[in-house]
Amino acid sequence: MTRVSSTAGRGTIWKTALLGVIFALGIILLVFWLAGAFAPKLRAAASGPGVADGRPLGTHETLIAARVVRVPATESAVGTIRAVHETTVAAKLLAKVTEVRVKAGQPVQKDEVLVRLDDEDLVARQERANGAVREAEAARNQAQIEFGRVSQLFEQSSAAKIELEQAETALQATAARLEQAQQAQREAGVTLGYATILSPMDGTIVDKRVQSGDMVSPGQALLTLYDPTHMQLVARVRETLVRRLAVGQTVDVRVEALGRTCQGEISEIVPESDVASRSFAVKVTGPCPPDVHSGMFGRLLIPLDEEEWLVIPQVAVRRVGQLDSVEAAAADGRQLTRRVVQLGRRLGDEVEVLAGLRAGERVAVPATGQGS
């Protein structure tokens, strides 16, 4: 009985092991099938990698040789477009906003009214200060008359010296009170002026942070505006590249969102490296397109030494799926074969070839593209 049970147990183990092997073999075969191991391979031609069967040169085609050109090399440093002159207008009072006369994107002129605050109590203070000045002026004038009268009597020996001194002291006291009242009047006028917030410069409103009815406190930001006619790119440049730049140097700036490149002048190189990025802040100002706005992404193109590019006409390239290819001519120039190439940067009507061609090899282009 024990022998039969042992034999049955061994049989079960062998069956389980066999099923595991079959399952693992199936998984391996599936992986190889998905990888294309059982698919027929394309026949490779002798002309090089990525070459298909050849064909003769067409009557409406011509051959252009791949050539080497020297192009000034550049290194880019990313940055942000900022306004040279940008300011934030803040409140100087604890008051209620009664009127906001601008909105984001609106151009404004210098000294144009932007925001009005509740000034009822400030107007009352101004009137009290004006009344105090008038009262002090009257007292000073009366003291002036009294001093003149006592002076005449003193000259006629009809008044004692002590009376003259008292009249002079009274005149000086009233003059001091008048000056104090005038100072309070000017202070009240300045404080009243804080209720009408004016634009400090010609510019464009960037951000409006208050609405009519809001309560504002001293130091609270109300509006932000900048001068759109003077923009700059603030870029972070690596320590190894900043030595190639100098204040006053003309460089190219690429604005990616507009697809445009404009020239600017380096106005400032901050003489302190950022500890985290080991880079310097470089500011470039100059002519910019009118549709450049603060906060846009830009690149500072730093000139380096020249480099060699292998280029061919762009019209010679055929794109199929994700592959770029050209039809390269054999040595006799009569037979064309398809050649897969790896392309790089554009240079006008030409494109850089990184791999797949050598200098001097000729590619087919339409006859109308002969001048490319």
Image (cartoon, rainbow, N blue to C red):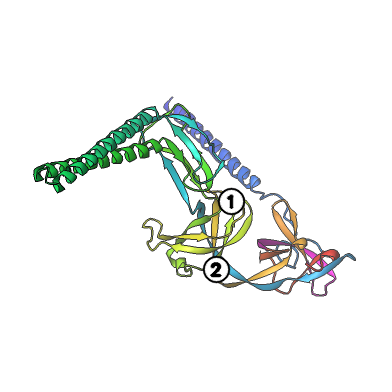
Q: Is residue 87 left or right of residue 104?
A: left
**Local crowd at mark 2 within 10 Å, few (<14), some, or many (≥20)?**
some
Segment tinted magenta in the rendering: 328-346
Q: Where does the image place residue 10, in percent across and percent down from the top left?
A: 47, 33
Q: Which one is in front in this view, the residue at disc 2 or the one at disc 1?
A: 1
* Residue in the foreground of this view, choosing between 32 and 10: 32
Q: Which residue is mark 2?
A: 303
**Is residue 79 covered in magenta?**
no
Q: Quadrant of residue 281?
A: bottom left
* Residue in the foreground of this view, choosing between 343 and 367: 367
**Residue 239, relative to residue 322: is it above or below?**
below
**Residue 273, relative to residue 195: is it above or below?**
below
Q: Where does the image place residue 277, in percent across and percent down from the top left?
A: 41, 57
Is disc 2 placed on a helix, strand or loop? Answer: strand
**Is residue 338 covered in magenta?**
yes
Query: Please, which residue is most extreme toward the top here?
Result: 1
Q: Tell me, yes or no, if residue 174 can be seen here.
A: no
Q: Is residue 184 left or right of residue 82?
A: left
**Local crowd at mark 1 within 10 Å, few (<14), some, or many (≥20)?**
some
Is disc 1 placed on a helix, strand or loop? Answer: loop
* Residue in the foreground of this view, choosing between 138 and 368: 138
Look at the magenta stretch and give its main secondary structure. Answer: strand
Q: Which residue is mark 1?
A: 292
| Residue occupying image coordinates x 38% and y 35% | 192
